[in-house]
Image (spheres, grey):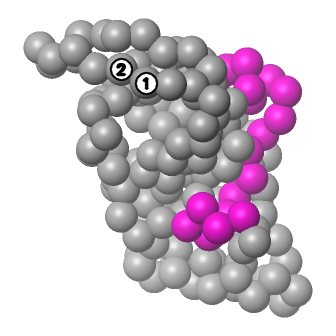
Amino acid sequence: MSTGQMERRAIGHAHVRATGKGREVTAVVVTYGVVDDYETVFMPGCFNDSLAVRMPRMVWAHDWSRPLGRWTDIVENNAKRLVLRGVMSDPTKVPDAAMAMELLADGTIDQVSVGFMPEATQQVKVGGKTVTGFTRGRLDEASLVLVGAVPG
């Protein structure tokens, strides 16, 4: 696995939800230790350095020309998962944010995909197979998507 290229991984069934507090959204953006459709795995804490510098942006399906808002807080970051809280941009001024809020509210959208720059990897054993584990990376965005690549 080479580093230096932007990569994307979708988190299936990530429990993205509007919180009922205006434009606030909470989502599991990374599930650690689970082999994804690309035969890779995120290792716990792999984005800690990145998150200390800058929170990722929220966009529609990795399309950086369609920003929805920004992730503002780390809700949970432990050995199991990374959960972020964010806020959608003003839906009266950002039509994609209005669309995303409605799709989240009715359950059409419930998954997230991360856009990240791998910075360090190592081979790890997970469930009896050896795969590439991301040990450090820059988390640039967490997108709302239709279908995820990481089970659970």
Residue at 53% across / 42% down in the picture?
7
In the image: residue 20, left or right of residue 95: left
In the image: residue 3, left or right of residue 23: left
Reply above or below: 24 against 28. Answer: below
Q: For residue 61: magenta? A: yes
Q: Which residue is mark 2?
A: 132
| Amino acid type at image mark 1 | Met
In the image: residue 102, left or right of residue 123: right
> Quick one: 125 or 107, which is closer to the camera?
125
Q: Secondary structure at mark 2?
A: strand
Q: Considering the image in quadrants, where does the N terminus appear? A: top left
The segment highlighted magenta reads 47-64
Residue at 27% across / 33% down in the picture?
39
In the image: residue 124, left or right of residue 19: left
Disc number for residue 1: 1
Q: Nearer the viewer, mark 2 or mark 1?
A: 1
Reply above or below: 27 against 61. Answer: above
Residue 6, horizontal then vertical, whole percent: 61, 42
Residue at 33% across / 50% down in the picture?
149
Farthest left residue?
A: 128
Mark 2 near mark 1, Cβ–Cβ under 8 Å? Answer: yes
Residue at 48% across / 37% down in the picture?
30
